[in-house]
Image: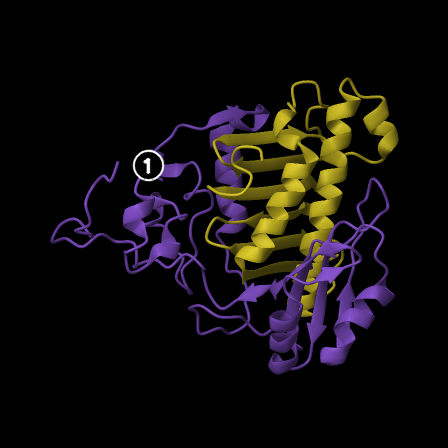
Chain colours: A yellow, B purple
Amino acid sequence: MAEGEDNGEFYLRYYVGHKGKFGHEFLEFEFRPDGKLRYANNSNYKNDTMIRKEVFLTPAVLKECRRIVSDSEIMKEDDNNWPEPDRVGRQELEIVMGNEHISFTTSKIGSLMDVQTSKDPEGLRIFYYLVQDLKCFVFSLISLHFKIKPI
Amino acid sequence: MAHAEVETVDFEPDDDDLMDEDVGDGSPSRAGTIPRLKSAITGGGSSSTPKKTKGRGFRDEAAAEADRSARMSARFDSLDSEGGPGPERSIEGWIVLVTGVHEEAQEDDLQNAFGEFGEIKNLHLNLDRRTGFVKGYALIEFENFEEAQKTISEMDGTELLTQTITVDWAFSKGSFKRRNIRRRSPRGPRSRSPRRRF
C-alpha cells in the first residue's frame, strides 16, 4: 500500500471558473480533513444564482474519495507542461495526502483533443479523468443529500 | 505508533489515527462558524512534518488565496443538524454508501441485493469516465432510518459478485474528529502504563 494512502491527512479542493461578461462564474468543492464537504456553484447567467452547500461526510465516504485519488496516481504528476490558465478559464486541483501536497493549475479542457495535443498528454489525461470522476462523486452526494441539481 | 501497547489501555484508543494538530490549532469546525479555507491545511505552519509540495498553484499563493477566501467566506447552507456523531438524514431519506462494487455490476445487481431491506428511492451507480466500467461505489437512498440501518448491519462485509463490499452511512451529523477528546490531561501523562516493554 502506498504511503499516505490509508491514513494521515487528507484534503482535496477543485475549482473551475472564469471571469467574463456574467461576472465570476465558477464551480468549487472541497473535502476537508474534518469530513466536511463544501460545494459552491456560481453562475450569473440571466439570474443571479449562487449555490453554496455543506455537509459532513462519514469516514467511509472520505476513504472512497481517497481511493479514487490514489488509484488515479495524480500525485505522481506535475503541472509543469500543462496549458497555463487563460482568459477562457482556470482549473485548480489541490490535494493533501499523507506527506504530499499538490496544487495544480491549468486552463479549461474542452475535450480529449485538447489533452492529446498538449505537451503532457499522459499527465493531463489523468487530471482530466480524475476531475470528471470527482465531480461525478460530488454531484451524486450533493444531489442526493439536498435534492438539487448541481449543474 | 510507538505506543501501540499503551494506547490499548487508554480510554479512547480509536482516536489514535487522528492528527494531533487538530486540537488547539483553533480550527473552528463547530456548526455555525465558517472556518477559513485552507487554515487546516497550509496555514499556521503547525504541521509536524513539512510536506512535499508540487505544482504551479503554490506560485501565486497570495492572490489566489485572497480570491479563494473571498469565494468561500460566504455562508454555506446545510440541513439543520444537531451536530455530533451519528448518521445525518438527507432531505428525503437516508443515504448509504457501498464500496468495493464490482466494475461490471449492473443496477439490477444492486436492486436485487439491497431492495429486500426497503424500497430503494434512489440509486447512483457511477461509472469510471475513462473505462466506462463501474467506478467502484454506489449510493443508495432509503426512505426510513430502519431500512438503511438494517441494510448496513446485514450487508457490510458481505460478498457481491465475488467482491467483498463495505456498506456504511454516507452523511454524518458532525465531524468524525472529536474535538475535545484528544486534549491531554493537564495533570500529566494520560497513562501510567510502562513506557516501554521491550
Q: Nearer the viewer, residue B40 or B73?
A: B40
Q: Is residue A122 left or right of residue B79?
A: right
Q: Residue at x 46, y 53 (%)?
A: A34
The residue under the point 42% across, 65% down is: B31
Counting the numbered discs, the total is 1
Indicate the position of residue B85 as horizontal and vertical percent values: 44, 68
* Above or below: residue A112 compared with residue B149: above
**Picture coordinates of residue A151, whole percent (x, y):** 75, 56
| Quadrant in the picture for the C terminus of chain B | top left
Pick whichever, A149 or A51, lies toward us.
A149
Does dot 1 land on a helix, a strand or a loop?
A: loop
Q: Is residue B95 left or right of residue B18?
A: right
The answer to whether residue A112 is left or right of residue B52 is right
Judging depth in this view, the residue of B96 and A21 nearest the camera is B96
| Vertical placement of residue B145 versus B185, above or below | below
Provide residue B96's location: percent of width, then percent of height. Answer: 65, 67
Q: Is residue B140 visible?
A: yes
Residue lying at 39% horizontally and 62% vertically, measured from the top left: B30
Find disc 1 in the rendering and name its residue.
B46
Tell me the kind of residue under disc 1: Ser
Chain under numbered label 1: B
Q: Up-down: is A47 above or below B149? A: above
Q: Is residue A83 left or right of residue B144?
A: right
Q: Quadrant of the N terminus of chain B?
A: top left
